[in-house]
Image (cartoon, helix red, strand yellow):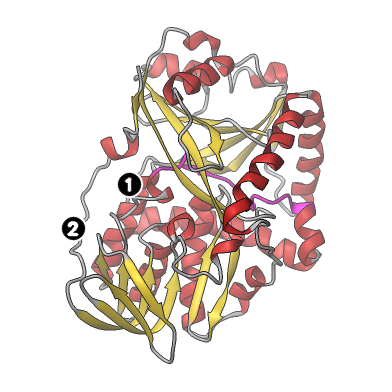
Amino acid sequence: MAVLNHNYYQATQNQQITCPSLQEDETADVAVIGGGLTGISAALNLAERGHSVVLLEAQEIGWGASGRNGGQIVPGLAIDQIALEKLVGREDARALWDFSLRAIDTIADRVAKHQIECDLRWGYLHAAVKPRQVRELQEWQTQLAELGHSETRLLSKDALLAELNSPRYQAALLDPKGGHLHPLNYTLGLAKAAQNAGARLYTRSPVTQVTPGQRAQIKTATGSISAKFLLLCGNAYLGGLMPAISPYVMPVGTYIIATEALGTDRATCLIGHNAAVADLNFVLDYFRLSADTRLLFGGRVSYSAITPTNLGESMLRRMRQVFPQLADVRGEYVWGGNVAITRNRAPHFGRLTDNVYFAHGFSGHGIALTGLAGTLLADLVDKQAADFDVFARIPHQKFPGGQAFRTPALILATAYFRLRDFL
């Protein structure tokens, strides 16, 4: 029986980050709200460039999506490239694709530079469940080649079995540029690097009030920060702190189960070359092997902020639909958390004032893009806006219905896509 809310990543974290809570009034060049990958990356970049930086986190470093997600590294944005072209034009869409590859390179560079032990592995399988999706993969491979990304391989069902031993999939596109890692250990490694560079990190310090101005004023219950610049990096957990941007993102619950250790032979028979995997359904399954040979299997979503009942058992059933040979395998961990989605599934970057900037709404593609977002936010502080503005030009709409009705509206829309997946 899986243990509800027992996070496998927390159980296997390989370092502790010691951060005090804010207890006094301080000044800084830059204040950052949010101790996940976006905020930590921004703090690290800024500290390395000589800025004085204070970061405030309401819980612990990596407590939110950065320490709970599937750990999957995926090229591109969550929005389809063709749909992105319709929003921003071919030139910007191509630039955004290139940025996503730069974001992945940033992960590799930081892991090497800061010697972060986070089980980084390369290889990604986009798996088709039905014949229509096989055609989509063929079209996608052509699109990727046109973008200069010609390293992918389309695996037919017979060839796929050597890489992914499941009867569920019709084909898959193997992308060597994607991969996976232990997200909490990666986040903690970046946080330690930020501290070493001089950033001041405060945890258990929820922000209660923000007052923009020539110097932004940020208050907590026990202290305050006065800063020339403020970076908003709370993503799904920013809540209503900044009402001007909160309607553009929706917190969505997603869930993962970790099996008992399978052993090397059995694990290798499931996923031959240790790639990360996700299917092409709207409400998708995604999974990978951990360093200690467990299957980490993610799926389910909750738009109501209510954890589904019998979550561990329902996740095991989904896993066994993909891998019936694991009928005897127990689940040992099951956990979840919120990610922030936007209506068009593209990340939402922008400025609230001349010195208050934000980046959020990565819609499930945050492992790589958050690191790039932190870099671009630091560039913006340094008056280098060109790359940030490519993201800022993506048009966004608020979720309809306001606070009272936007969740029911989204549940109805998702029900349509669930039915489409089923049919």
- x, y percent for residue 18: 18, 58
Q: Which circle marks residue 185 in the picture?
A: 1
x 44%, y 89%: residue: 213
- Quick check: 138 above or below 322? below
Packing grade of label 2 (10 A; few <14, some 14-19, many >=20) is few
Q: Quadrant of residue 294?
A: top left
Q: Which quadrant would the C terminus be assigned to in this image? A: top right
Q: Which circle marks residue 174 in the picture?
A: none
- x, y percent for residue 76: 64, 52
- x, y percent for residue 161: 63, 17
Q: Which circle marks residue 18 in the picture?
A: 2
How many numbered markers are drawn? 2
Q: Is residue 109 left or right of residue 98?
A: left
- Residue 165 visible in the shown view: no
Is 72 a magenta residue? yes
Q: Nearer the viewer, residue 202 or 222?
A: 222
Residue range (magenta): 68-82
Is 203 a magenta residue? no
Q: Specify the amino acid type for callout 2.
A: Thr
Q: Nearer the viewer, mark 1 or mark 2?
A: 2
Q: Is residue 295 left or right of residue 7?
A: right
Judged from the image, the secondary structure of the residue bearing numbered disc 2 is loop
x 45%, y 26%: residue: 311
Q: Specify the amino acid type for callout 1.
A: Asn
**Cα distance in 3D space between marks 1 and 2:** 14 Å
Lower position in the chain sequence, tag 1 or tag 2: 2
Judged from the image, the secondary structure of the residue bearing numbered disc 1 is helix
- x, y percent for residue 345: 65, 53
- Quick check: 160 above or below 90? above
- Residue 389 visible in the shown view: yes
- Quick check: 341 above or below 160? below
